[in-house]
Amino acid sequence: MGIVTPGFRGRPRPSGPELPPGQYLTEDFPVLSAGPTPRVPMDRWEFVITTETSREHRWSWTDLMALPSDTPTVDIHCVTKWSKLGTTWQGVSLDTLMSDVDTAADYALVHSYGGYTTNLPLSDLLDGRAWVAYRFDGDDLHPEHGGPARLLVPHLYFWKSAKWVRGIQLRFDDEPGFWESAGYHDYGDPWREQRYQGD
Amino acid sequence: MPEQLDLGPHLDGNALAGPLREIFAVDVTAATSRCAACGQAGALAGLHVYASAPGMVARCPSCEEVVLRMVRTPDAAWLDLRGAVALRIPM
């Protein structure tokens, strides 16, 4: 590592082959936030999956901790152009959370404490590609990074990995989320550089 | 559109060009907005703006609900004012 490393507003490094187009590498973990950081008492925290028939599946924090967890090491790519490689997390796979959920929905609208939302196809949450993550780099997930728990969907731009996740609404239709309704791409594949609508 | 609806005399959106150019050429931060969530009114300049994000998010200083969002893409600007009842722009 050089003496000077590019920060959030630093000079972009040229993209290497391991980076999606237009991204630069960062070693730190920039904090992006569209509002105040919600503080949820752990005894009131819950995660709820609501099906298209309004059936609710709920997990308290204790319930979540009792589930088997994964420790994925993944690259993350923010639409503001920084990428961070080899990040280590701990969380519960959405495959585990969805295992007893009966649904015919094609889409998911993710809700967060604080009101944030983001949408994605339900299939992108399955097959070992998404987690409700509660530890980062060996420590409890800090609130500024979405703790106590955030969604982790590393194969899409990181705005899809909703901080402070509180639930997922399963839907037949694709309802745009917070950034998707204000110019950002509906899907957000970093390798196809799907930053904005029309990309 | 209902079949019996009489639209009456109207213009297309191009008629907005002059008036909107006049509005957005001024410093809108002096305008007063009313929060659609809690009703608090105040100058746009008094909103809480979160800019370390994929866009700018301006929130009501009273209830912290989103009043205004703005996203700048390479070829467009997106302005979402659904969190504001109206803007009063001094002229």
Image: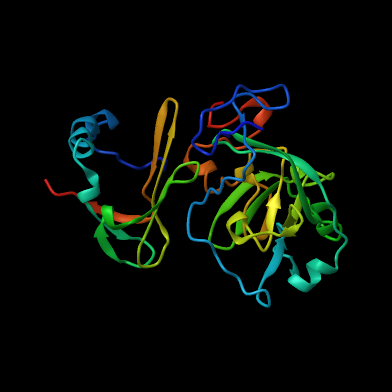
Count of marks, rendered view: 0
Position of A179 compared to B85: left or right?
A: right
Rendered image quadrant of residue B43: bottom left
Position of B89 compared to A146: left or right?
A: left
Q: Nearer the viewer, residue A178 or A67?
A: A67
Applied colour scheme:
rainbow
Q: Nearer the viewer, residue A55 or B91?
A: B91
- Residue lying at 26% horizontally and 63% vertically, measured from the top left: B41
In x, y percent, where is residue B61? 35, 63
Quadrant position of the C terminus of chain A in the picture: top right
In x, y percent, where is residue A184? 53, 37
- Residue lying at 58% horizontally and 57% vertically, measured from the top left: A144
Q: Residue furthest left?
A: B91
In x, y percent, where is residue B10? 24, 35
A28 versus B47 height, above or below: above
A83 versus A122 height, above or below: above
Position of A121 compared to A37: left or right?
A: right
- Residue lying at 73% horizontally and 45% vertically, measured from the top left: A106
Q: Residue furthest bottom?
A: A43
Quadrant position of the N terminus of chain A in the picture: top right
Rendered image quadrant of residue A147: bottom right
